[in-house]
Image (spheres, helix red, strand yellow):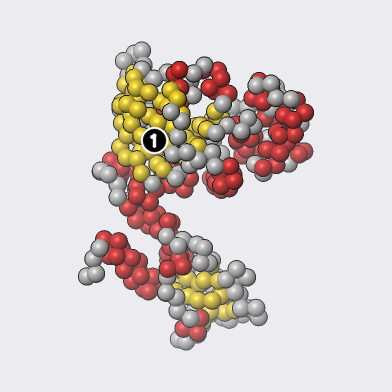
Amino acid sequence: MITFDKVSKTFPDGTLAVDNLNFELPTGKITVFVGPSGCGKTTSLRMINRMIEPTGGRIMIDGQDVTQQDAALLRRSIGYVIQHAGLFPHRTVIENVMTVPNLIGTDKKKSRATAMELLLRVGLTESMADKYPVQLSGGQEQRVGVARALAADPPVMLMDEPFSAVDPIVRAGLQTEFLRLQGELGKTIAFVTHDIDEAIKLGDMVAVFKEGGHLAQYASPQELLENPANDFVADFVGRDRGFRSLSFDSSEVLELDPLDSVRVGNERLVLDSAGRPRGWAGPGIADENSPLSVAGTFTVADSLRVVTDLAISSPVGIAVRVNASGVADGVIRHPSLVRQLDERRRLRAGTTA
C-alpha cells in the first residue's frame, strides 16, 4: 500500500504543485492519476520514488516513509516506465532489460535468462533481444520499457504516460497487454495519464486531480462515471459518462428474444449451416445471398456498453448474441434494450416509477 499523508510540494519559484494530498493506493491494484496539464499528477508520482522531494507531509510504502530510505536503493526497488520508454540507445534490448538486475548484483546468466522470459511475457520475440532501440517501433520500445521495469520483480511500479506516444491502435494493444500482465503479476501500480478513457479502462481506482494539485475525487471508475463528486469532475469525465458506465455491467443480465422473433416482416437474420450469423436480409433491406452485416455480435462475457453500441450500429437496430462457438442464440432489439437499461437505472436509484 502506498499512502499519501498531507503531502504537498512547493517549488523554489513558489509554485504550489501539490496541495495537502491524502489518499491510499491499494496493494496489488492499479491506481490511475488523471487530470489536465499542470495539475500535479506527475509531480505526485515522482515523489513516490523521490525523483522529486516533497516539501510537506509523508509518503509511505507499506508503512515506511520513503524519505527515510536511501534514494538510490528505493528507486532500484520500484519499477519505473516513462513516455518514449527511455531506453539506453547504446545498449541492446536485452541489456536494457538487465539494467537493474546488474546493478543489484544478480548473476549475469540468471539475469539474462530472466530478461529473455520477460521479453516473451510482454509479447516480444527472442530475435529482438540483440537489437538496439533505434531498430524498434514505438510500441516495441514501450514493451521493452515495461520488461525493464519488471526485471527486478518490484512490488511497486510507477508509470508516467507510458502509452501516450504511440498511435491509437498500438496504444489499445499495449493497454490490453498491460492488463493481462497485471492479472498475472498483481503489482501495486501508480499510473499517470491525461486521458480519462485510459484511466477508466486501466484503473482499479482513479484519482482525479485539478489545477493547484488538489485531489478532486478518488473513486473506482464506475463510481466516478455514475457519481462525479462535483462539476469539475463531471466536465472532465465527459458528457457521455452514462454510456461509458455501461462497461462495468455484464450483458448476461439482459432478457433476450429468440432467434425466430426476427424471421418475420422485413427483418430476417441469415445464418450459415452451422447457425453462425451472416447478416440481415428481407424486402427493403438486402438479398439473402448478400445480406447486410450484423455490425458485430456479443457474448454473455461482453458488457452492456458493447451491446448498446451494437444495437445502435446495427442496420436494423438489433444486436445478436452468439455462444462460444459463434452460433447465434438470441437477439435484443433497440427498444427492448432501452427499456431494460431504464429499469436498471431506476433500480439503482431505488425507484419503481
Q: Residues within 10 Å of mark 1 (few under 14, many from 20)?
A: some
How far across and down, in percent of the image, does residue 137 sit? 65, 37
Q: Residue at x 50, y 36 (%)?
A: 189
Residue 148 shows in this picture: no
Q: For the residue labelled by badge 1, is the local secondary structure a helix, a strand or a loop?
A: strand
How far across and down, in percent of the image, does residue 291 sit? 57, 76
The quarter of the rendered structure image containing the C terminus is bottom left
Asked which quadrant contains residue 11, the reply is: top left
The quarter of the rendered structure image containing the N terminus is top left
Q: Residue at x 34, y 47 (%)?
A: 224
Residue at the far top: name it. Answer: 12
Residue where numbered disc 1 is placed: 24
Q: Choose between 312 and 113: the one closer to the eye.
A: 113
Q: Residue at x 38, y 46 (%)?
A: 220
Residue at the far bottom: name it. Answer: 264
Q: Residue at x 42, y 70 (%)?
A: 254
How far across and down, in percent of the image, does residue 215 sit? 32, 34
Q: Amino acid at mark 1?
A: Glu
Q: Choose between 33 and 272: the one closer to the eye.
A: 33
Q: Left or right? Give the position of 116 relative to 55.
A: right
Image position of 186 with respect to 64: above or below: below
Q: Left or right? Give the position of 285 relative to 230.
A: right
